[in-house]
Image (cartoon, grey):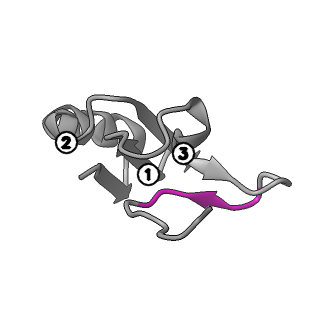
Amino acid sequence: MCGIAGILGLDSKERVKKMLKVLQHRGPDGEGIWSANKNLSLGHVRLSINDLSEAGNQPMFSEDGNIALIANGEIYNYL
């Protein structure tokens, strides 16, 4: 299972980085952080199961870049 962290508060990016270090055992296959500003950050450590490509890296963004997504889960019957 992947690890997800988020902070709304001061120095959020640095705090999320520390949280992801603690969660590293949950996602040894990749790490990503998104920050809207210094007060809002989301982070993800990835455990690759089905999609081993870089296309599964997170955070994921909408085509226009206005929406960021961090999630843990599987989509069954995707083929």
Q: Nearer the viewer, residue 73 or 16?
A: 73
* Three-letter code, disc 1: Leu
- The residue to which callout 1 is attached is 42
- State left or right for residue 32 relative to residue 5: right
Could you tell me residue 76's position as x and y percent?
Answer: 47, 69
* Three-letter code, disc 2: Arg
Which comes sooner in the sequence, label 3 or label 1?
3
Q: Residue at (20%, 33%) from the top-left corner?
A: 24
Residue 14 tag number: none
> Marks 2/1: CA distance?
16 Å
- The residue to which callout 2 is attached is 26
Residue 11 makes an appearance in the image: no
Q: Compared with residue 4, is residue 21 higher up or lower down, i.e. above or below?
A: above
> Marks 3/1: CA distance?
7 Å
Residue 2 makes an appearance in the image: yes
Q: Residue at (54%, 47%) from the top-left corner?
A: 59
Q: Is residue 28 inside the magenta stretch?
A: no
Could you tell me residue 29's position as x and y percent?
Answer: 34, 29
Disc 3 and disc 1 in contact, CB within 8 angstroms? yes
Disc 3 and disc 2 in contact, CB within 8 angstroms? no
Which comes sooner in the sequence, label 3 or label 2?
2
Magenta residues, dominant SS class: loop
